[in-house]
Image (spheres, rainbow, N blue to C red):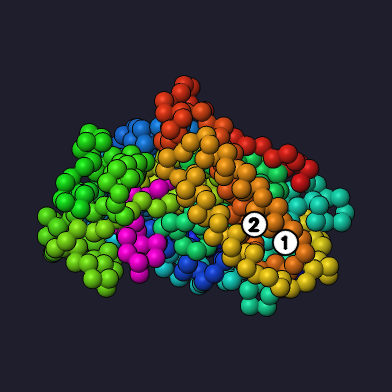
Amino acid sequence: MHHSDVIIIGGGLAGLSAALHLADRMSVTVLAKRELEVSSSQWAQGGIAAVLAEGDSFDSHVHDTVVAGAMLNDLPATRFVIEQGPSAIAWLRAQGVPFDTEHGELHLTREGGHSQRRIAHVADATGAAIQRALLARARAHQRITLLENQVAVDLITARHVDDGHQDRCHGVYALDLESGKVLTFTAAHTILATGGAGKVYRYTTNPDTASGDGVAMAWRAGCRVANMEFIQFHPTCLYHPKAKNFLISEAVRGEGGVLRLPDGTRFMPAHDERAELAPRDVVARAIDFEMKRHGLDCVYLDITERGEAFIRQHFPTIHQRCLELGIDIAREPIPVVPAVHFTCGGVLTDLAGRTDLPGLYAVGEVAYTGLHGANRLASNSLLECVVFGTAAAQAIAQAPAPRIPEARPWDESRVSDADELVVISHNWDELRRMMWNYVGIVRTDKRLERAAHRIALLQSEVQEFYANFRVTRDLLELRNLLQVAELIVRSARLRHESRGLHYSADWPRTAAPAAPTILVPRIPAAAA
């Protein structure tokens, strides 16, 4: 059994922000599912949005966020996050993040949906630069313990302790991949910073770790989730057989890149007056429409007019990766397809990251704060990570420390090693294909009904497997992905309109008033 004041599940920007704000006052253990460098934050290219330029304003950033979010955003949460933007950038710079500058000032770029240049960045690899800087700080701090290859199994709640302790979160069980044993981590406060659920779909820009673990664990522990139907498809993922999950940044379109058909025809102006600078949901649907209309495997993003010198300076990572694959983006367009990029819904929280279960917080992509509404505005996600990581840390520092009961160790005395792992691999593949085909960019009632039916059958099979065999990383991830898939489909079936990222051919109009989809577990958090 391992004990600390705070356990943070996830080592990306949200988790590390919380850890660094807490460590001067409390002992913090950060559990990473793989190596600490493997997170969605690490993969973020574009940058972090904040009001920093003369002529920009909080009102303008709020307006852009709400327009992109199809009016479904929570306004107090949106304003709270955006007004913290300048201080978030200042804190990151103080941690050593080397944001690009020009003439002594931060260089700000513009991305789709933004009316101003407000994206602070480090070339086209902002997430990697932020992750390196914060990891260096965390590794140097004596009160932060960083543990890699720890796969969260389930949250420790009242049902896992023997003394009838009050209903709250007491930590987490985690599978140590090196030993194969499930370890017990207890703490006064637990923070979910597990990222999104892109791996529930066949094509995604997310890393392999994005299997919805935090949402699934919180739901099983009795927490509400919201807006799970809003899955953001990034319009431009590199289409190449050797390119796995490689994103072509929003900033490429922000800096003048245009989308073309194979014959060179530009098509976005026919879909939206904002053309390539329309929000992601609009651009992704337009690409999906043109691909289906013309029977295409991909479309093309053309930035050649900006010239090689500009491209090498602003997009060195993209330029180099494409060159490795035989594509010179300074001289030819980039083949792209939409791919799942971001989970706009998640575990319902307040403005301090608190969930329904006392002692449990959720920050970053795993959380539903109300900021993103029906569609996330580009580069608001890294901002959300810093703001809510900081807010949760401040709330924890001010909260009284409860007595931590002794949790029962993980019991695997009645299970055996699995003898037919093909069940896991087959069901994993079927789930991801089914979600892509039935719960993708365009949905119908019939497709959603079929998806719900098949998910229920797969859940039954996997639950039987889970009950009888020792847990493995693949089994845990599949169990969580099925739970998240169920929540996505259930939410989508409840929304009888098209709004933002949820487009239904059976309900093409936008209804009024705008309202979030909130799902409540059968067992409330107080009884978990």
Q: Residue at x 80, y 56 (%)?
A: 160
Around disc 2, counting alpha carbons within 10 Å, would you say few (fewer than 14), some (14 to 19), or many (20 or more)?
many
User: In which image quadrant can residue 154 be found?
Assistant: bottom right
User: In which image quadrant can residue 376 be found?
Assistant: top left
In the image, residue 144 lies at what x, y percent?
A: 58, 67
Q: Amino acid at mark 1?
A: Tyr
In this orientation, does residue 282 appear? yes
Q: If you read the primary sequence from the N terminus, does the residue marked by circle 2 or circle 1 appear first? A: 1
Q: Per the image, is 236 magenta?
A: yes
From the image, tell me which residue sits under label 2. Answer: 479
Q: Residue at x 74, y 48 (%)?
A: 168
Taking the view exactly as shown, the residue that stands out farthest to the right is 163
Distance, label 2 to label 1, CA atoms, is: 8 Å
Q: Nearer the viewer, residue 500 or 486?
A: 486
Q: In the figure, is residue 25 to the left or right of 279?
A: right
Q: Which residues are magenta?
A: 232-250
In the image, residue 139 lies at what x, y percent?
A: 51, 72
User: In which image quadrant can residue 498 be found?
Assistant: top left
From the image, tell me which residue sits under label 1. Answer: 466
- Quarter of the N terminus within the rendering: bottom right
Q: Give above or below for 41 relative to 506.
A: below
Q: Residue at x 80, y 68 (%)?
A: 415
Q: Amino acid at mark 2?
A: Arg
Mark 2 touches mark 1? (CB < 8 Å): yes
| Mark identifier at residue 527 | none
